[in-house]
Image (spheres, rainbow, N blue to C red):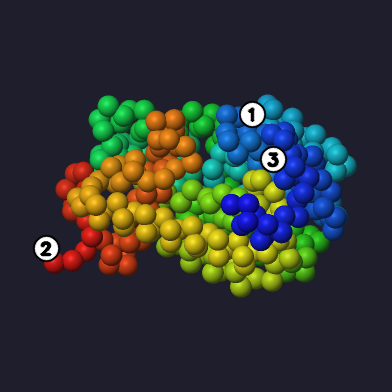
Amino acid sequence: MDADLAAIDISGTLQKQAWEDDVLPPVENLGRGLWSVPVPMPQSSLRYVLVYLLEQPSGVTLIDAGWDTEEAWTALNAGLGKAGYEITDVRSVLVTHIHPDHYGLAGRVREASGAWIALHPADAAILPQRYMQMDGLLTTMRTHLLECGVPLEAMDSMRGASMPVRGYVNAVLPDVLLENGDRPEVPGWELTAVWTPGHSPGHLCFYDAERRLLMSGDHVLPRITPNISVHPQQTSNPLADFLDALDRVSGLEVEEVLPAHEYRFRNLARRIVQLREHHERRLSEVTAVLASQPGATAWEITIQLTWSRPWSEIQFWMQRAALGETLAHLIVLESRGVIRRTREIPQRWELSGPR
C-alpha cells in the first residue's frame, strides 16, 4: 500500500499528516475560490467527510454537507466562518450521493439559508424508502439476506444494522435533479455533473474543466476502495457499473482529485489502475474459494475472504457491507460466465462448466 500511495502523489499533505496523527485536518484555502472543510463523523473509521466550499459572487456553494449532528453542524459553520461566510450565504448544496455523511446536513443547510439541494435522479428515487418509510426496505432486506445464506441467529442484527445512522440524516427531498453531463448553476464555476454509479446508484462527481479539478465524492479515494455492495436499493450489477464509471472519469483532464474522505491527490490515472487491480485480485480470490467449496452461499464465501481484520472483530454493519461486496463480485463473475448460481433459498454458487 505504501508503494501505491507514493505513486499517486499526495497533494493534501496537511490532510495526510492529520490522518496519520488521528486528528481532524485543518480548514484549508485551496486557492481559486475553493475551500476544504473537514466535518467530523461519529463512530466511523473514516473520521470526517471533506465538504468543499465553492466561492461565487453572491455567496458559496457546498459540495456535500456532512452528518446531521451538532458536532458536524458546528464544524461546518466554523469552516464557513474561516472562509469569511455564514450559513446564510450558502446558495446551493451539490450532493454526491445520499449516504448520511454526505446528505445528512443538506436539509438543515437549506432551512437556514434557503439554498437549493441537487442530487442525481437515481439516488432521489430511493431516498424516501431509505430514510422516510423504511418498513418495506427492512422486509426486502430480510429476504435478500436469506438468499445470501445469512444465519437466522444473525438475521435481526444484520437486517437493521444501518438503522442507527438514520438519525444522522435530515430526510428531505432535493430541489434539483442532475443527470450525467448537466451543468449546475454555480456562478464563477464551469461545473459538469459526472454520473459515476457503483457506490450508490446515483453517485455524482463534479468536474471543473477550467481548473482541472475533480470533486470525486466516494467514487475515487486515495487509500481505500469504496464499498460497492449489492443490496435491495442497488442496481443489478453495481461493480460493473463502478468499473464502467472509472472509464468515464479517466477520460477527463484532471490535475488534482478532491475526494470526500482522507486527502487530496494527483495522478488519477494511476489510482484508477490500482482500483481495477484490487477488484481483479478479489475476483480471483472469490473464484478460488468456489473452486475449493462448490455450492457455497454468498455468506459462506464472504467469511473465507481476506478482510482488514479478523471476521469475528467486524461489527454487523460492516459484515453486511462485506457480504454486499462479495455478492457484487459474484455477480460480475456470473456476468462473465465464470460462475453460476441456483435460484433456491439460500442461493448457492459454483464454477461454470458441465453439470
Q: Where is residue 297 in the image (x, y as percent from the top left)?
A: 25, 46
Q: Which residue is drawn at 23% across and 49% down?
A: 293
> What element does badge 1 sit on?
loop
Disc 3 residue crowd, few under 14, some 14–19, many 20+, Cα 10 Å: some
Q: In which quarter of the image is residue 248?
A: bottom right
Amino acid bearing label 3: Trp
> What element does badge 3 sit on?
helix
- The residue pinned by badge 1 equals 69
- The residue pinned by badge 2 equals 355
Q: Position of residue 102 (x, y in %)?
A: 61, 43
> What element does badge 2 sit on?
loop
Q: In this view, does 37 lie to the left or right of 46?
A: right
Q: In this view, does 186 lie to the left or right of 338?
A: right
Amino acid bearing label 2: Arg
Q: Which residue is drawn at 75% across and 51% down?
A: 12
Nearer the observer, disc 1 or disc 2?
2
The Cα atoms of the two marked residues, 3 and 2, are separated by 51 Å
Q: Quadrant of residue 312?
A: top left
Residue that protrudes farthest toward the right in the picture: 84
Give the answer, above or below, for where 203 lies relative to 87: below
Q: Where is residue 247 in the image (x, y as percent from the top left)?
A: 54, 69
The Cα atoms of the two marked residues, 3 and 1, are separated by 22 Å
| N-terminal label among 3 and 1 | 3
Q: Which quarter of the figure is the C terminus placed in?
A: bottom left
Specify the label residue 19 is tagged with. 3
Q: Is residue 151 left or right of residue 172?
A: left
